[in-house]
Image (cartoon, grey):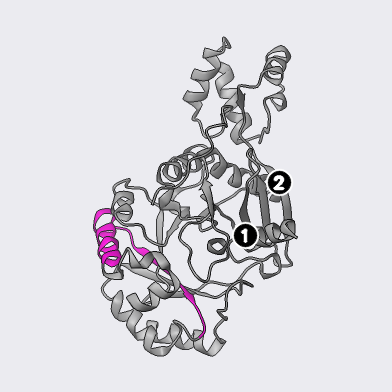
Amino acid sequence: MTANPIPASSKVLPLLGRSQSELTEWVVSQGQPSYRGKQLYAWLYEKGARSLDDITVFPKAWREEFAQNPTVEIGRSQIYLHKQTRDGTEKFLLKLADGEIVETVGIPTSKRLTVCVSTQVGCPMGCDFCATGKGGFRRNLAKHEIIDQVLTVQEVMQQRVSHIVFMGMGEPLLNYENLVGAIGVINKDIGIGQRNITVSTVGIPNQIPRFAEEHLQVTLAVSLHAPTQEVRAQVIPSADRYPLIALMDDCREYVEITGRRISFEYTLLAGVNDSAEQAQELAYLIRGFQSHVNLIPYNPVSDADYKRPSERAIQTFVQILEDHKIAVSVRRTRGLEADAACGQLRGQHEKALAK
């Protein structure tokens, strides 16, 4: 499956996403002294500059030159909509240079700030229960558009980001090069440890072993959502092209290559995949695996008929997995008031515009 690239009409060069050495090389090519590379680097990643004119340590004449004939830009998005809930979760719609809208979320706790990052505008996977999938697919995000989400949340919430989860809009492994590039910048230039980064995927043929060969210290989260091929194909259309047995073989190869455990994401859908029998099947499927199961009680979406399971069903599912010595946790729901389900806020925004 080939994803559309960022539009070719975007000829202005973004500086965000470049290393200090690359920025230094660029300023020197512009006839400026090399020390301006270090200044530019600090203004991009520490001071949050949104335009070259913001960088007041640069000569005024040089800044005016770019204002009159822009060939480069910082590469920051605009905050189109910002919502906050009582639990402190903050959700953003960001407007990109071509007018597309993408979501990102800041999730604070007493000790950390996690950013849920998108990698695509929309998503081509079409998962039946997902608001993003209902909205269709537009294009991949460029590396600087991914990085911008982290900086935006950090600036608005005035707290250093400690954790990243690539669980927003899109399938990260379909935007492979920009994903890996963004992880490098987030780690080296923004300063977030790789072990605090999670990449979530529904599973793309051949991409999980490829990702393993990057030898990153990130956590891989595989969106399983069903213990059998039949049920998985019901909720994830792409499962027809990537059978469960092949996915599990790739997951085992990932563990062998990296030595790191996999987190299996499992959205609990009432009456679909939340029965005691299915909990037994899941335990059998991942037995002997170096893994962890993250159960996610469903966040209701207006365009889907699925329902959130009862608390009793959730606890029964957990108990069965624990009885089989499977490491399991239940994700605490955050930000329901801000349409927390992936793609939900953007979807409601687009519907309002269409009226």
Residue 324 visible to an observer of this rendering: no
Tell me which residue sits at (54%, 38%) in the image. 144
- Find numbered disc 1 in the image and state the secondary structure of the residue it sits on: strand
Percent of width and height locating residue 154? 64, 47
Q: Quadrant of residue 112?
A: bottom right
Per the rendering, the mark at residue 107 is 1
Q: Which mark is residue 187?
A: none
Q: Residues within 10 Å of mark 2 (few under 14, many from 20)?
A: some
Q: Position of residue 193 (x, y in %)?
A: 47, 48
* Frontmost residue, 86 versus 231: 231
Residue at (43%, 86%) from the top-left corner? 319
Dividing the image into 4 quarters, which one contains the C terminus?
Answer: bottom right
In the image, 217 versus 333, the foreground residue is 333
Tag 1: amino acid: Ile
Give the magenta part as a residue range. Answer: 246-270
Say which of marks 2 and 1 sits in front: 2
The residue shown at (30%, 76%) is 285
Q: For mark 2, give the secondary structure.
A: strand
Residue picked out by circle 2: 79
